[in-house]
Image: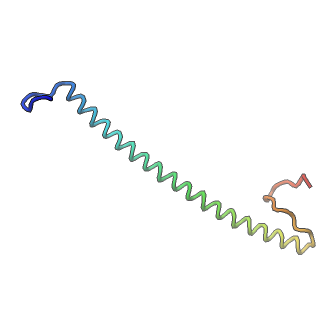
Amino acid sequence: MAQPDEDPSFFERERERFTREISTEFDELLSSTNGLNRKLEEVVTMTKEYATIAELWSSFYQLMRSAGQEETGEEPQTASAPGASASHQ
C-alpha cells in the first residue's frame, strides 16, 4: 500500500477509476434489468387479461350458437372456433 504522503501510482489510480466505472455500469445494468422485468410483468398481466376476455367471448359465442341451433331444431355440434372450416363433416 502507498504511504499517506505519497501519490498513488498510475496502477492504483487506474484501478480506482475502473472500479468506479464498473460500479456505475453495474448500477445502470441493474436499473435497466429492473425496468425490463417490470415491462415483462405488464405483458404477462395483459396476456392473462386477454385470456379472460377471450374465454368470456367464447362462452357467449357457444351460448348464442346453441340457442340458434335449438330454434332451428338442429343438433348442437361440438365447439369450433368462429370462422373455422367444417370440411371434415
Rendered view: 50 above or below 60: above
- Color scheme of the displayed model: rainbow
Query: Residue at left 87%, top 64%?
Result: 77
Q: Left or right? Give the position of 76 relative to 6.
A: right
Query: Residue at left 81%, top 59%?
Result: 80
Q: Looking at the rendering, in which quadrant would you find the C terminus? A: bottom right
Residue 54 x %, y % = 68, 62
Rendered view: 7 above or below 46: above
Q: Quadrant of residue 19?
A: top left
Q: Residue furthest bottom?
A: 71
Q: Quadrant of residue 29?
A: top left
Rendered view: 27 above or below 60: above
Q: Residue furthest top?
A: 10
Numbered marks: total: 0
Residue 64 x %, y % = 80, 70
Q: Left or right? Give the position of 7 relative to 27.
A: left
Query: Residue at left 6%, top 30%?
Result: 5
Task: In this rendered view, identify the residue nearer to me: 30 or 3.
Answer: 3
Query: Residue at left 65%, top 60%?
Result: 51
Q: Looking at the rendering, in which quadrant would you find the N terminus? A: top left
Rendered view: 4 above or below 67: above
Q: Quadrant of residue 56?
A: bottom right
Residue 33 x %, y % = 43, 46
Q: Left or right? Give the position of 62 relative to 50.
A: right
Q: Left or right? Give the position of 68 relative to 19.
A: right
Q: Residue furthest left?
A: 5
